[in-house]
Amino acid sequence: MDRSASVLELKGVGEKTAKLFGKLGIVTVGDLISHYPRDYEIYEEPVKIAQASSGKVCAVYGAVTGILSERRVRSLHILNVAFSDGSDVMHLTFFNMPFLKKVLKQGGYYLFRGNVQVRGNVKLMEQPKLFSVEDYRRQMNRLVPRYALTKGLTNQAVQKAVRQALSFCSFEEEFYPPEILEACGLMPEREAVEAVHFPESGEELLRARKRLVFDEFFAFLYLLRRNRQVSEGLENHWKMFETADTVRFLEQLPFPLTKAQARVWQEIRNDMGSPACMNRLIQGDVGSGKTILAVLALLMTAANGCQGALMAPTEVLAAQHYETVQEYVEKYGVCFRPVLLVGSMTAKEKREVYEKIASGEANLIIGTHALIQEKVQYKALALVVTDEQHRFGVRQREHLAEKGESPHILVMSATPIPRTLAIILYGDLHISVVDELPKGRLPVKNCVVNTSYRPTAYKFIAGQVAQGRQVYVICPQVEAGEMEDLENVTDYAEKLKSALPPSVQVAYLHGKMRPGDKNRIMEEFSAHSIDVLVSTTVIEVGINVPNATVMMVENAERFGLAQLHQLRGRVGRGEYQSYCIFVSAKEDKETMERLQILNKSNDGFFIASEDLKLRGPGELFGVRQSGEFAFRMGDIYTDAGVLQEASEALDRLLRRDPDLKREENLALGKHLEQAAADTVDFRSI
Ligand code: ADP
Ligand code: MG
């Protein structure tokens, strides 16, 4: 079967299931095969309730002894069931599953698996999963894949479909020459894909992962190398000099630049006036103040009568930048004539913006990847700044080069990485580092707690809101049903509304909302008509609301520490003392120790590396440490070693065969060209 065959070709997949798959972006059999598990679970032998310890996920087998209560809190249906196995009793709580009342028979025996909590002297599980004993036995002591799901689609259904797809699907012939396969110890692609879905052991899983991550990095680095040839030594057609505009703007700003900012600003000015085109990366931890540097470069461009573009990875972030700039125009009278261009605008709105860009009426274009679509014709594009997403930059530079324009390039990144890694990943860019935070920032206070701390946290949140501050609460998933045991944004927002005083304005935000709605919510939060924002990690990148002082993260155990560090960077951006509350649903020693690392350091790279030391093979999946590079599976922290290997292998190869023209490298060359063509891989949030 061809990879491009529809999932409908699979047995047991009808119109309805195909539609659900569609919601996950899975249309073809190939899509299904590359729908890798989010993580793996090991189903252990069921335990006696008396032995079930708090904070651990385990299975219990016993009888339902009665219904304790059934309530409704706003739109939330809550069912409480008593359960016993002779050793002890346990309470089971189910949200929005009213049908269970009929399914669960009093006196009937059932197997449940969930996270054990203790309240007072009662053991309980919230939203545990129901299994038939045979099903459970079959999966016991294996690594069972867990997939990203959507309402109506079960994990079992995905597993079944993936198994079928794997047995039918054909794979490309091996494209690496034997030398690379051997030197890097790569297993065949087919084996790797199979083992990633259904690993026999943790060791096999790691080897499988390595092959797939290697493939991804290798293709990415190839694109980078090719790009370097294009951009190296490009002549500067846009020689620019500083005017009074930037000087005046700096004088009007309410704060002086930090030393680090001033140094980087000098580097940018030098670049833009030099004989070669600027190709620069600004690296700086969250909150170090990179935006203002972009604004300065863009202002210099506008003042020189040219156009500048600022690209952000999300519409929300683009809209925020647009507002900031508009404020500068109103307050300081800077010479920007900005327009916003994002995918969710109507065709008519876009057309109007295109016209302004083509005529030169707009001298600052802010937006998402819509900016590089073919229809956009610039009058005099002299500078392109990309914020918070480097990969984005790589492709986009190619696109612009294809259009015959070679603007200055400035890339901003908040991903903290050491120099050796930076040279591999940003090989084609000069690197500036903003290694200093603005003065007067109070360090964020952190705490790591279990779920029983919630009432206290809510009181604290209410207190901060009463003082005029704002709050983020992060949940790992959008709606119930994707992963049963995790908090989700929609239900949590309801729960929170009932836990907080009615005067507190609570709203929610997630990536599946319509772009217009997302922007509206973010604007309302910026304008402080929302006090508490319950959100997925869509707010992770770039959002700047200095009045927000509390970041509460639910299921913190599910996130990589580097990602938690980025989330933490959303607070502590203003004059107020800020707080992070990491709530872990797991309380075992390892989890708590891991999360405590965040307390010890503010150095993103240190945090990410420490994190890795404490993880097991099954845990390396589903944990995205840095979203910035948008790799499917690879992670620059987790897989720093593979990145290094891929880079060395590629260098060896290109030294011997720069154009991949030798017989043994032809297949690889073809594969890489295809991979490069497929790389238009923008995040849709
Ligand atoms: P990031 O580097 O994470 O993109 P931002 O550019 O969004 O950070 O800046 C974070 C906050 O710090 C903003 O509110 C910005 O106005 C402020 N800021 C930037 N530079 C300085 C400075 N030199 N002194 C004081 N505040 C600053
Ligand atoms: Mg930023």
Image: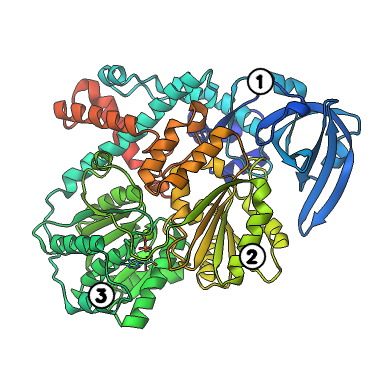
**What scheme was used to colour the molecule?**
rainbow
Q: Position of residue 302 (x, y in %)?
A: 24, 73
- Determine the secondary structure under disc 2: helix
Upstream in sequence: badge 1 or badge 2: 1
Q: Can residue 633 be seen in this view?
A: no
Q: Residue at x 62, y 53 (%)?
A: 489
Q: Which of marks 1 and 2 is in front?
A: 2
Q: Is residue 320 above or below residue 24?
A: below
Give the Cα distance between marks 1 and 3. 64 Å
Question: Three-letter amino acid code at disc 1?
Answer: Met
Give the Cα distance between marks 2 and 3. 38 Å
Q: Which residue is drawn at 63% across and 56% down?
A: 457
Q: In which quarter of the image is residue 99?
A: top right
Residue that label 1 marks: 140
Q: Is residue 407 above or below residue 186?
A: below
Q: Residue at x 82, y 40 (%)?
A: 100
Q: Which of 405/318 is in front?
A: 318
Question: Three-letter amino acid code at disc 2?
Answer: Ala
Q: Tell me the quadrant of ligand 2.
A: bottom left
- Determine the secondary structure under disc 1: loop
Give the Cα distance between marks 1 and 2. 44 Å
Residue that label 2 marks: 462
Q: Position of residue 380 (x, y in %)?
A: 22, 68
Q: Where is residue 372 in the image (x, y as percent from the top left)?
A: 33, 58
Residue that label 3 marks: 250
